[in-house]
C-alpha cells in the first residue's frame, strides 16, 4: 500500500482530517512537524545574513533602542 503525507495548515483542518479518517476506519499517525514555518526560517536567514555582514548591535544598544 502507499503512504499519503498531508500537511494541515491549522488545528481545524487537522481535526477535520482526524474525524474523517476515524469514520472511514483508516489507520493514521500524527507526528510533530519536522520543519519550522517559512516565516521563522526566513527570519533566521535574515539574522544570519546580518551577522555575516557585521550588521549587529550589542545587547545594551538593543535595550536602549527598544526599552526606553
Image: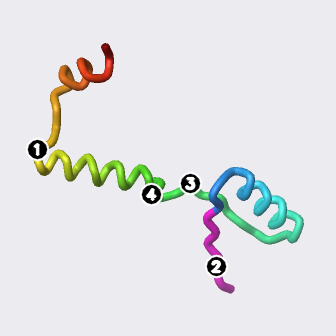
In whole angstroms, how far apart are the C-alphas of marks 2 and 3? 17 Å
Q: In the rendered image, which residue does mark 3 sit on?
A: 32
- Tag of residue 3: 2
Q: Secondary structure at mark 4?
A: helix
31 horizontally vs 22: left or right:
left
Measuring from the top left, give residue 25's x and y in whole percent.
85, 69
Say which label, 3 or 1, has the lower sequence index. 3
In whole angstroms, how far apart are the C-alphas of marks 3 and 1? 35 Å
Extreme-bottom residue of the structure? 1
Q: In the rendered image, which residue does mark 1 sit on?
A: 54
Say which label, 4 or 1, has the lower sequence index. 4
In whole angstroms, how far apart are the C-alphas of marks 2 and 1? 46 Å
Residue at 13% of width from left, 50% of height from top?
A: 52
5 horizontally vs 41: left or right:
right
Q: Is residue 19 above or below residue 27?
A: above
Which label lies toward us, 2 or 1?
A: 1
- Tag of residue 38: 4
The question of residue 45 being in magenta is answered with no
Dot 3: few (<14), some (14–19), or many (≥20) neighbours within 10 Å? few
Q: Secondary structure at mark 1?
A: loop
Q: Secondary structure at mark 3?
A: loop
The question of residue 2 being in magenta is answered with yes
Say which label, 2 or 1, has the lower sequence index. 2
In whole angstroms, how far apart are the C-alphas of marks 4 and 3? 16 Å
Q: Nearer the viewer, residue 43 or 66?
A: 66
Amino acid at each position: 500500500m502507499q503512504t499519503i503525507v498531508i500537511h494541515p495548515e491549522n488545528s481545524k483542518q487537522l481535526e477535520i482530517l482526524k474525524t474523517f479518517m476515524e469514520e472511514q476506519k483508516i489507520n493514521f499517525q500524527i507526528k510533530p512537524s519536522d520543519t519550522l514555518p517559512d516565516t521563522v526560517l526566513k527570519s533566521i536567514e535574515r539574522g544570519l545574513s546580518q551577522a555575516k555582514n557585521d550588521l549587529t548591535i550589542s545587547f545594551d544598544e538593543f535595550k536602549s533602542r527598544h526599552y526606553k
